[in-house]
Image: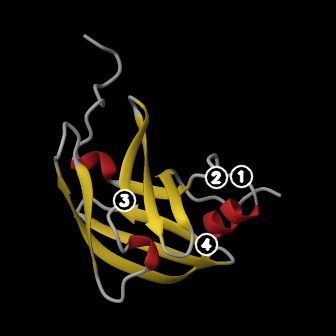
Amino acid sequence: MSILPDTSVLEKEDYYGEYIIDRNFFKGKQADWQYNHFRMEITENDSIFLYTMENEEIISVNKGKISTVKPYSSERLVLKMNEPNHHITETNPTTYRKSWWNFYLVFKSKKFHNMYFRKGKWEKIKE
Protein backbone atom coordinates (compact mmCIF):
# COMPACT_ATOMS: atom_id res chain seq x y z
CA MET A 1 0.00 0.00 0.00
CA SER A 2 1.36 3.37 -1.07
CA ILE A 3 1.31 6.45 1.16
CA LEU A 4 0.83 8.73 -1.87
CA PRO A 5 -2.29 8.42 -4.02
CA ASP A 6 -1.89 7.05 -7.55
CA THR A 7 -2.36 10.14 -9.71
CA SER A 8 -0.47 8.87 -12.72
CA VAL A 9 -3.74 8.96 -14.69
CA LEU A 10 -5.74 12.20 -14.81
CA GLU A 11 -9.51 12.15 -14.39
CA LYS A 12 -11.95 15.03 -14.81
CA GLU A 13 -11.97 15.71 -11.06
CA ASP A 14 -8.21 16.35 -11.14
CA TYR A 15 -8.82 19.45 -13.27
CA TYR A 16 -11.05 21.16 -10.69
CA GLY A 17 -9.38 24.09 -8.98
CA GLU A 18 -7.82 27.50 -9.42
CA TYR A 19 -5.13 28.17 -12.02
CA ILE A 20 -2.51 30.87 -12.40
CA ILE A 21 0.09 31.65 -15.05
CA ASP A 22 3.19 29.54 -14.42
CA ARG A 23 6.00 32.11 -14.45
CA ASN A 24 8.69 29.42 -14.18
CA PHE A 25 8.70 28.66 -17.91
CA PHE A 26 9.54 32.14 -19.16
CA LYS A 27 10.62 34.60 -16.51
CA GLY A 28 10.39 38.32 -17.01
CA LYS A 29 8.03 41.16 -17.80
CA GLN A 30 5.76 39.25 -20.21
CA ALA A 31 5.20 36.35 -17.77
CA ASP A 32 4.61 38.79 -14.91
CA TRP A 33 2.14 40.78 -17.06
CA GLN A 34 0.22 37.61 -17.98
CA TYR A 35 0.21 36.48 -14.35
CA ASN A 36 -1.20 39.84 -13.23
CA HIS A 37 -3.88 39.90 -15.95
CA PHE A 38 -5.23 36.34 -16.22
CA ARG A 39 -6.30 33.53 -13.94
CA MET A 40 -8.74 30.69 -14.30
CA GLU A 41 -11.02 28.46 -12.27
CA ILE A 42 -12.65 25.11 -13.04
CA THR A 43 -15.43 24.20 -10.62
CA GLU A 44 -16.98 20.90 -9.59
CA ASN A 45 -20.12 21.67 -11.59
CA ASP A 46 -17.89 21.58 -14.72
CA SER A 47 -17.88 25.36 -15.21
CA ILE A 48 -14.78 27.23 -16.36
CA PHE A 49 -14.11 30.89 -15.67
CA LEU A 50 -11.30 32.87 -17.30
CA TYR A 51 -10.75 36.06 -15.29
CA THR A 52 -9.18 39.15 -16.85
CA MET A 53 -7.77 41.43 -14.19
CA GLU A 54 -6.46 44.96 -13.86
CA ASN A 55 -4.72 46.16 -10.70
CA GLU A 56 -5.82 43.06 -8.73
CA GLU A 57 -9.49 43.61 -9.67
CA ILE A 58 -11.45 41.29 -11.97
CA ILE A 59 -12.66 43.39 -14.92
CA SER A 60 -14.21 40.64 -17.06
CA VAL A 61 -15.12 36.97 -16.87
CA ASN A 62 -15.37 34.55 -19.79
CA LYS A 63 -17.51 31.56 -18.88
CA GLY A 64 -18.02 28.10 -20.27
CA LYS A 65 -18.35 24.41 -19.52
CA ILE A 66 -15.78 21.63 -19.53
CA SER A 67 -16.00 17.99 -20.42
CA THR A 68 -13.26 15.45 -21.00
CA VAL A 69 -12.26 12.90 -23.59
CA LYS A 70 -9.98 9.95 -23.00
CA PRO A 71 -7.82 9.43 -26.12
CA TYR A 72 -5.14 7.69 -24.04
CA SER A 73 -4.99 6.66 -20.39
CA SER A 74 -5.57 10.19 -19.00
CA GLU A 75 -8.59 12.37 -19.63
CA ARG A 76 -8.10 15.61 -21.59
CA LEU A 77 -10.06 18.84 -21.23
CA VAL A 78 -12.64 19.93 -23.80
CA LEU A 79 -13.92 23.51 -23.55
CA LYS A 80 -17.31 24.83 -24.63
CA MET A 81 -17.05 28.57 -24.00
CA ASN A 82 -19.90 31.08 -24.12
CA GLU A 83 -19.75 33.80 -26.74
CA PRO A 84 -17.98 36.09 -27.03
CA ASN A 85 -15.01 33.81 -26.54
CA HIS A 86 -11.55 34.97 -25.45
CA HIS A 87 -8.46 34.33 -27.58
CA ILE A 88 -6.95 32.26 -24.76
CA THR A 89 -9.80 29.74 -24.68
CA GLU A 90 -10.52 29.46 -28.41
CA THR A 91 -8.94 26.01 -28.51
CA ASN A 92 -8.69 23.18 -26.01
CA PRO A 93 -5.58 23.22 -23.83
CA THR A 94 -2.89 20.57 -23.97
CA THR A 95 -2.15 18.85 -20.68
CA TYR A 96 1.47 18.11 -19.80
CA ARG A 97 2.76 16.17 -16.83
CA LYS A 98 5.63 17.72 -14.89
CA SER A 99 5.85 14.69 -12.67
CA TRP A 100 3.52 11.86 -11.73
CA TRP A 101 1.67 14.11 -9.25
CA ASN A 102 1.75 17.42 -11.10
CA PHE A 103 0.47 18.77 -14.43
CA TYR A 104 0.05 22.04 -16.27
CA LEU A 105 -2.18 23.28 -19.08
CA VAL A 106 -0.91 25.02 -22.21
CA PHE A 107 -3.31 27.26 -24.10
CA LYS A 108 -2.43 28.48 -27.58
CA SER A 109 -3.27 32.17 -27.82
CA LYS A 110 -3.24 34.13 -31.10
CA LYS A 111 -1.83 37.11 -29.21
CA PHE A 112 0.55 35.53 -26.69
CA HIS A 113 1.41 32.14 -28.26
CA ASN A 114 1.68 29.46 -25.58
CA MET A 115 0.31 30.35 -22.16
CA TYR A 116 1.20 28.05 -19.27
CA PHE A 117 -1.30 27.62 -16.44
CA ARG A 118 -0.80 25.56 -13.27
CA LYS A 119 -2.93 25.04 -10.23
CA GLY A 120 -2.39 27.68 -7.58
CA LYS A 121 -3.83 30.62 -5.71
CA TRP A 122 -3.30 34.05 -7.22
CA GLU A 123 -1.22 36.35 -5.03
CA LYS A 124 0.22 39.75 -5.75
CA ILE A 125 3.79 39.54 -7.05
CA LYS A 126 6.25 40.73 -4.45
CA GLU A 127 8.44 43.48 -5.84
- Residue designated by label 3: 93
Labels in figure, total: 4
Amino acid bearing label 3: Pro
C-alpha gap between disc 3 and disc 1: 21 Å
The mark that comes first in sequence, 3 or 1, is 1
Q: What element carries label 2?
A: loop
Q: Residue beneath label 1, please? A: 27
Which callout, 3 or 4, points at the residue further toward the start of the chain? 4
Are there few (<14), some (14-19), or many (20+) residues within 10 Å of tag 3?
many
**Spatial distance from mark 4 to mark 1, Cα to Cα?**
15 Å
- What percent of the width, then of the height, locates residue 81? 29, 77
Q: In this view, does 52 lie above or below 47?
A: below
Residue type at mark 2 is Arg
Is the residue marked by circle 1 packed among few (<14), some (14-19), or many (20+) residues within 10 Å?
Answer: few
How far apart are labels 2 and 4 at the CA level? Answer: 13 Å
Which mark's residue is nearer the viewer, 2 or 3?
3
For marks 2 and 3 on the same chain, the one whose residue lies earlier in the sequence: 2
In this view, the residue in front, 19 or 23, is 23
Q: Which mark identifies residue 84?
A: none
Taking the spot 49% from the left edge, 74% from the top edge, the residue there is 110
Observer-nearest residue: 30 or 101?
30
Split into 4 quadrants, where in the image is the N terminus?
top left
Q: Where is residue 73 in the image (x, y as percent from the top left)?
A: 19, 36
Q: Left or right? Give the position of 13 relative to 61.
A: left
Q: Name the residue under label 2.
A: 23
Q: Tell me the residue at 59%/77% (across/down).
A: 53
The residue labelled by disc 4 is: 37
Residue at the spot 70% in from the left edge and 65% down from the top edge: 30
**Do residues under tags 1 and 2 come within 8 Å of each other at their CB atoms?**
yes
Q: Earlier in the sequence, mark 2 or mark 4?
A: 2
In the rendered structure, which disc, 4 or 1, sits on the residue that comes first in sequence?
1
Q: Distance between the residues labelled 3 and 4?
A: 19 Å
